Amino acid sequence: MTQLHVEAEGTSRADPEAVWSLVSDATTFAQWGPWDASGYESPGDESAHGVGAIQWFRTGRTTSVERVLEIDECRRLVYTVIRGIPVRNYRAEVTLTPTSAGTHIRWEGNWDTTLLGRIVHRKLRSFYPDMMARLVAAADHGVAASE
């Protein structure tokens, strides 16, 4: 089956560790992103925010629940949607790459092409860039506050 795809990229002046602190802790997402509330349903296998953690994000009346699949500390986070939005086989990856000026961030998601998946695609095509802009702004704000 073919897959739908969304992605957003941005560069922050913050180092990868500072950006990682924002993207690896679901409890911070509502502070910097377009979510109304966020948190954890259950901890990961070896740490609260680690592999196996079940995290949730509420926007309006929609709550997306996700499972963390892979973590490469300060570099890469992979998760899947397990309920909440009507997508099948959703897999997203956040990649942080150090640069001479800070951190390049890439956030991408893929899921099966279904009728409801297409509706979600339309929404996420605008959601991802907004989320990225807010993430970069929050990371950069942290840099400015420490200067």
Image: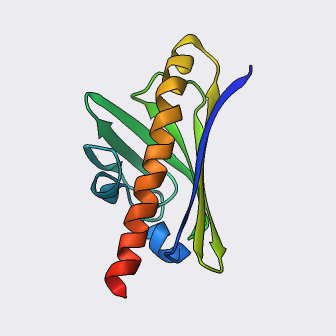
Percent of width and height locating residue 126: 48, 35
Relative to 12, say whether 59 is above or below.
above
Q: Is residue 66 visible?
A: yes
Side of 2 where 6 appears, left or right: left
Residue 2 locus on image (x, y percent): 74, 22
Along the horizontal axis of the image, is 88 left or right of 48?
Answer: right
Q: Is residue 24 visible?
A: no
Viewer-side residue, 98 vs 49: 98
Furthest residue toward bottom = 147
**At 36% across and 71% down in the image, what residue appears?**
141
Going 33% across and 57% down the picture, which residue do you hit? 32
| Corner quadrant of residue 99 | bottom right
Q: Is residue 13 above or below residue 91?
A: below
Q: Which residue in the rendered view is the most extreme toward the right?
A: 1
**On screen, 118 above or below 67?**
above
Locate residue 11, reporting x and y percent: 57, 64
- Write the residue at 55% across / 73% down: 16
Farthest residue toward the top?
115
| Closer-to-camera residue (46/64) | 64
Residue name at image x 64 percent, y 23 percent: 112
Q: Quadrant of the N terminus?
A: top right
